[in-house]
Image: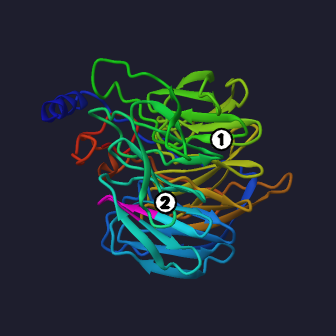
Amino acid sequence: MVAALLVLASCSKDKDIDKPAQLTPFSATLKVNHVWSASVNDKGAKPLRLGLGLAAEGNRVYAAGHSGEVIALDVATGRSVWRTKTKAPISGGPGVGGDLVAVGSSGGEVIALNTADGQIRWRVRLNGEVLSAPAISERVVAVRTVDGKLRGLSPKDGHELWTQEQQVPRLSLRGTSHPVIVGDLALCGFDNGKVIAVNMNDGTLQWESTIAPPHGRTELERLVDVDSPVRVSGQDVYAVGFQGRVAMLALDTGQIWWSHDASSYRGVGLDDDALYIPTADGEVVALRRRTGAEIWRQKALAHRGLSAAVTTDNAVVVADYQGNVHWLDKATGELAARAPSGKVRVSNPPLVVDNMVLIINDAGRISAFRTTPIGAGMSGTRKVPAEDKPATTEAAPQTAAPASEAPQAAAPEPATPAPAPPTPPPEQK
């Protein structure tokens, strides 16, 4: 492994790092209103929230910090409902379902709390770091660990019900796909480029499908991780891999109906007509759901380390490595609005609740935004100052991504630093 890292280091010296695209003023069609802000206590923790996103159910939104705090907020006002200190280095979650909210730690611990008051119901230790949110149903808490295992735990006390395992390549991106529960199936992507479906009743493998096989001569070229969660609509499953493909699969059999070359480590957004992919190079691509045909491609945010995309009624929303939140017109892909969220990278997907966009940046700050259309003939273009004030547009200088946010390469379990490839800027195991 050391020899492989030295080879990667020597190769990287000969390659130029692609600079993030410069943000420029534009004519906005949406006005951004900042609704509220909150934060999860992460004092003393490194600004790395790779698997610490937001989850919502009912009138509450949940978040967690690496220092061990789990919080519940009122989604309308951002006011704290409860805060619980778990005293664990949380690295995955939260996931919410029914009366449970669950998180996972870098030490391999899974902790379940009551959604009503934040009291810890149970905690169990697994043999693997948790870097994604658990999925929760009435029968199973599904947890993905970095050792290539998908585990089903009992919601009552956390004891293990079943395990499914996939081979982990010697080199992979740092991150794991969080499971998705649909009916009796738990679906999850893996570092070997496969998506599997597990019967939650007994843990048997329902199907497995290869999104893209590894290719290339070097370990770096052969990365095909499916690190983002699959998206399910009706009987259709959508998945995308890094340096691989985006594909539409059948929910019951895993059969691939269509696929196209693509590379993404963040995931896809979905609405009734299209799916939206922020690529590893920072382009945002819209494809027809039924055929995979390209609708539009937006290149204005190239190499800006985009988050996954989510959709509102009239826009596609992504965030970047400087904490800027971008709204794109669904029909054309043109920039519709922009607002800052704290000058810190946003690694996790935005969350849409009642058409309000919630963002958590890598320092644990949570921001809520609403947008309203700007009337015909009104210009929304203006220069926004650098301070953290939500606005419609913003101009930013052309800068390269900070070195501390470059990828890391390592074996599946211990993390070992390695030089960054030219693009993209994901974390690597």
Task: Residue 386 in the image: state x and y as whole percent.
Answer: 50, 64
Q: Amino acid at mark 2?
A: Ser
- Judged by its main secondary structure, the magenta piece is strand
Q: Is residue 151 above or below residue 59?
A: above
Q: Left or right: 216 with respect to 76?
A: left
Q: Quadrant of the N terminus?
A: top left
Q: Amino acid at mark 1?
A: Val
377 or 388: nearer the viewer:
388
Residue where numbered disc 1 is placed: 232
The part of the chain drawn in magenta is 103-110
Lower sequence index among marks 1 and 2: 2
Mark 2, residues whose alpha carbon is within 10 Å: few (<14), some, or many (≥20)? some
Q: Quadrant of the C terminus?
A: top left
Q: Left or right: 81 with respect to 52?
A: right
Which residue occupies 38% across, 35% down?
166
Task: Residue 394 in the image: state x and y as whole percent.
Answer: 58, 56
Per the model, the C-alpha gap separating discs 1 and 2 is 24 Å
Q: Is residue 388 something that shows in the picture?
A: no
Which residue occupies 59% across, 22% down?
259
Which residue occupies 60% across, 70% down?
99
Mark 1, residues whose alpha carbon is within 10 Å: few (<14), some, or many (≥20)? some
Circles 1 and 2: CB atoms closer than 8 Å: no
**In the structure shown, which secondary structural element does the residue marked by tag 2 occupy?**
loop
Q: Is residue 373 magenta?
A: no
In the picture as drawn, the residue positioned furthest to the right comes out as 376
Q: Is residue 104 magenta?
A: yes
Task: Residue 177 in the image: state x and y as whole percent.
Answer: 47, 44
Residue where numbered disc 2 is placed: 154
Q: Is residue 128 above or below residue 123?
A: above
69 or 121: nearer the viewer:
121
343 or 7: nearer the viewer:
7
